[in-house]
């Protein structure tokens, strides 16, 4: 997945709006973070801790948790060598989570 493909997916989600900077864009729904591009190959995605554990178990090559995020409801995904469908699904789940809060 490329950053452009991520942006297209986010734009397809109802009410999802781009914020952030050119170098570090982020997408929000109802002013709540859905996903943020950290660099051209890494994104941070909002998720519950339980969902994060299932993502890590099912797609260890795609998702990870840096030590600074261990206590937060977030997961990081690798775009350039990860499972594109799993990333799209995680972003869609983050959108639903934040929209419904």
Image (tube, rainbow, N blue to C red):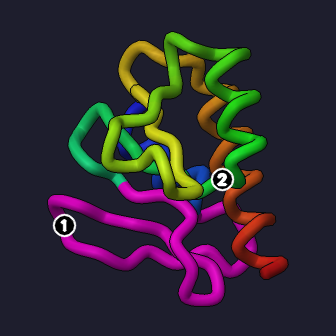
| Residue at x 70% of width, y 64% of height | 95
Tell me the CA gap for discs 2 and 1: 24 Å
**What is the residue that sits farthest to the right in this orientation?**
100
What residue span does the magenta drawing correspond to? 11-36
Q: Is 61 drawn above or below residue 49 in the view shown? A: above
Q: Quadrant of the C terminus?
A: bottom right
Indicate yes or no whether the magenta region holds residue 87. Answer: no
Give coordinates of residue 29: x percent, y percent.
62, 79
Name the residue carrying label 2. Answer: 47
Q: Which quadrant of the figure has residue 52? A: top right
Q: Is 15 drawn above or below residue 10 in the view shown? A: below
Task: Find numbered disc 2 in the image and state the secondary structure of the residue it sits on.
Answer: loop
Q: Sequence order check: which comes first, mark 2 or mark 1?
A: 1
**What is the residue that sits farthest to the left in this orientation?**
23
| Residue at x 27% of width, y 49% of height | 38
Mark 2 is surrounded, within 10 Å at the Cα level, by few (under 14), some (14 to 19) or many (20 or more) other residues, namely many
Name the residue carrying label 1. Answer: 22
Indicate yes or no whether the magenta region holds residue 17. Answer: yes
> What label sits on residue 35 in the rendered view?
none
């Amino acid at each position: 997945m490329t950053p452009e493909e991520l942006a297209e997916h986010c734009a397809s989600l109802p009410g999802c709006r781009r914020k952030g900077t050119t170098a570090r864009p982020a997408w929000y729904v109802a002013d709540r973070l859905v996903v943020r591009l950290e660099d051209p190959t890494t994104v941070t995605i909002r998720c519950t801790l339980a969902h994060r554990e299932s993502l890590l178990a099912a797609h260890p090559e795609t998702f990870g948790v840096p030590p600074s995020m261990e206590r937060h409801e977030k997961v990081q995904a690798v775009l350039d060598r990860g499972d594109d469908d799993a990333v799209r699904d995680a972003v869609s789940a983050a959108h639903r989570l934040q929209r419904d809060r």
